[in-house]
Image: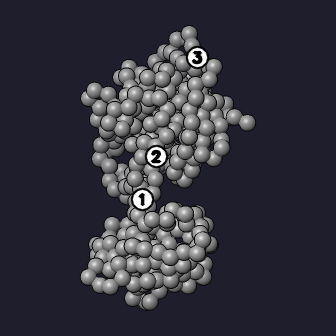
Amino acid sequence: MAKQTDALIVGAGPCGLFQVFELGLLGIKADILDSLPTVGGQCTELYPDKPIYDIPAVPVCTGQELIESLLEQVKPFDPTFHLGEEVTKVERQDGYFRVATSNDQEFHAKTVFIAGGVGSFQPRRFRMEGIDALEGTSVHYRIREPGLFAGKKVVICGGGDSALDWALALADSVSELTLVHRREEYRAAPATVDALKKLAGDGKVRVLENAKATAFAADGEQIKSVEITVKGEDPVTLETDHLMAFFGLAPKLGPIAEWGFNIAKKAIEVDTAKFETNIPGIFAVGDINTYPGKKKLILSGFHEAALAAFAAKAVIEPGKKVNLQYTTTSPVMHERLGVDDPMKKD
């Protein structure tokens, strides 16, 4: 059965989360979905520990701290999250949009907000012919069930936080573990690198640097071995039960490009009064949109979300005047936020 919603937000990054807040202030409850398994978009996937200095009134915060603060801010509006789902189809129906997802879920939404950053993020994959057939069984780009690898031979490729974190997490449960990194320098936190080197010194992890996976052998969907080419040396063949890669994420516009939007330079064109696309009732905020003078900044996305919310209110409740009310003085806003009137005197 299709889920009915006044507002469906596609993208759970900072702009998508702030869109929830701006809609909530206007009495609109939102559903929010993302192709990633966690909330946060680029902030949590690409730079959770990196400092951000240009959020108004916040001198500095990390990407993860920003997401945590936004999640706290939207709590009064109780949004429904649908994670690990990618929108596959959007169709205009009589009075609503029919939105289908990769998990066979269907929404009937009065308005839709595209807040997908620079598109859906997909893991960067191995470039070896035929290896895609092994994905999800013995080749992995994300880990959902760590217990699957207990007692198995595992090869992990990558030099960032995800690769090293999983190497540390699995070292005690697998029968054999090799980490393959294409450089000598790591992108992971220094403490994590030190912990990996200690495990290597203790013989719990084999580390191959200046190396990459160049070939593999498999039996059906089960990988049997992987060939590792080390710079300046002969290739080595490692027997393995599971091969993992954590090369980071690559943005792709994906199915959005087929929804009928006006696209310019891989971004959706919008007006600057409503941040509405060429399809009435569908809005785009954040890095996914483009307009004259566009600046790809989080704070710009916050501004866009505010104006898009007011425009959506007029779509959801046609003919009803939308008044601007201030959170400082409006009793209606205080009620929606669940706070006491700060101006009320005892």
Taking the spot 44% from the left edge, 89% from the top edge, the residue there is: 203
Question: Which is nearer the N-term, disc 2 or disc 3?
Answer: 2
Crowding near the residue tagged with mark 2, few <14, some 14–19, many ≥20 C-alpha atoms within 10 Å: many
Q: Check residue 257 in the rendering and tell me which mark sits there, or answer none.
A: none
Q: Amino acid at mark 2?
A: Ser
Where does the image place residue 169, in percent across and percent down from the top left?
51, 74
Residue beneath disc 1: 124
- Label 2 vs label 3, nearer the camera: 2
Where does the image place residue 118, in percent across and percent down from the top left?
39, 43
Q: Check residue 317 in the rendering and tell me which mark sits there, or answer none.
A: 3
60 with respect to 325 (left or right): left
- Label 1 vs label 3, nearer the camera: 1
Crowding near the residue tagged with mark 1, few <14, some 14–19, many ≥20 C-alpha atoms within 10 Å: some
Splitting the image into 4 quarters, where does residue 124 fall? bottom left
Q: Amino acid at mark 1?
A: Arg
Q: Is 45 rendered above or below residue 236?
A: above
Q: Check residue 120 in the rendering and tell me which mark sits there, or answer none.
A: 2
**Whole-Å distance between the Cαs marked 2 and 1?**
12 Å
Q: Secondary structure at mark 1?
A: loop
**Whole-Å distance between the Cαs marked 1 and 3?**
43 Å
Taking the spot 48% from the left edge, 69% from the top edge, the residue there is: 244
